[in-house]
């Protein structure tokens, strides 16, 4: 790919090795040409912007939401047809809503990658931070996710969970909100 990109006058650098290929960082104005070059070369890879538009080395910027999940799911931004909406509707994420019904923050970074079908696909990665209560600091949970293949392939894991208060307050709140004993 190095020679191909040089021949096309595309400035680039190698990024992270991925499970289906490599990340190639290019200027955002060269992204479409770089994807076409990958397709022509039949090379599996991900194209990210070298100029900071979506650099793979940068973290997604969190957006403070501070709203109940039920309210967000009715909003246009988190509609079922959007990638953001699909994140909130995946069973791995939805299963946390009973205990943590509020979204504190949502971080998302859109990426493009070349799929096995040699087509450009959208991907979204980031995290959702949930809380028991928006007013009182009781407990929270962060779920990180990777949504690929235009929203049809999903991976997530609970990154961490935290509780506020003295040991007695934590135990009382765990019982109050249905978490049971430690």
Image (cartoon, rainbow, N blue to C red):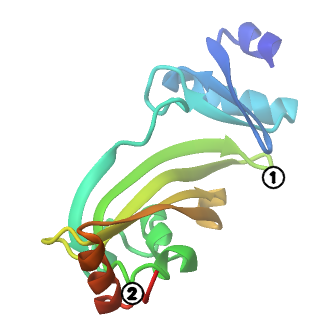
Q: Which residue is nearer to you in this view: 97 or 112?
A: 97
Q: Is residue 126 above or below residue 6?
A: below
Above or below 161: residue 4: above
The x and y percentages for residue 178 are 38, 91
Question: Which SS class for mark 2?
Answer: loop
In the displayed structure, would residue 106 be above or below residue 85? above
* Image-based side of 90 in relation to 45, left or right: left
- Side (left or right) of 171 relative to 11: left
Residue under the image location 32 percent in, 88 percent down: 177
Q: Tell me what residue is drawn at x 36 percent, y 62 percent.
A: 129
User: Residue 117, labelled with which disc?
Assistant: 1
* Quadrant of the image containing the N terminus: top right
Q: Residue at x 18, y 71 (%)?
A: 134
Name the foreground residue: 171 vs 69: 171
Neighbor class of circle 1 (other Cα within 10 Å; few <14, some 14-19, many 20+) is few
Instruction: Choose the circle earlier in sequence order: 1 or 2.
Output: 2
Checking the image for residue 98, the label placed there is: 2
Disc 1 and disc 2: Cα gap in Å? 38 Å
Q: Position of residue 53 (x, y in %)?
A: 43, 30
Residue in the image at 36% along x and 69% along y:
78
Can the viewer see residue 132?
A: no
Image x and y of residue 151, in percent: 59, 64
Q: How many marks?
A: 2
Instruction: Write down the quadrant of residue 175 in the picture.
Output: bottom left
Residue 174 quadrant? bottom left
Q: Where is residue 106 drawn, in percent x and y?
A: 35, 57
Front label number (1 vs 2): 2
Q: Is residue 164 visible?
A: yes
């Amino acid at each position: 790919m190095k020679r191909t990109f040089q021949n096309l006058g595309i400035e680039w650098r190698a990024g992270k090795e991925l499970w289906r290929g490599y990340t190639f960082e290019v200027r955002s104005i060269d992204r479409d040409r770089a994807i076409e070059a990958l397709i022509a070369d039949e090379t599996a890879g991900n194209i990210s912007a070298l100029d900071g538009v979506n650099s793979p080395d940068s973290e997604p910027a969190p957006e403070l939401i501070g709203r109940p999940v039920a309210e967000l799911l009715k909003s246009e931004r988190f509609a079922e047809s959007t990638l953001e909406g699909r994140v909130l509707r995946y069973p791995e994420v939805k299963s946390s809503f009973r205990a943590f019904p509020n979204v504190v923050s949502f971080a998302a970074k859109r990426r493009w990658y070349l799929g096995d079908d040699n087509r450009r696909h959208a991907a979204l990665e980031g995290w959702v931070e949930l809380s028991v209560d928006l007013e009182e600091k009781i407990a929270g949970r962060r779920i990180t996710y990777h949504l690929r293949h235009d929203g049809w392939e999903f991976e997530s894991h609970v990154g961490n969970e935290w509780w506020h208060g003295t040991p007695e307050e934590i135990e009382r709140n765990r019982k109050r909100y249905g978490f049971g004993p430690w």
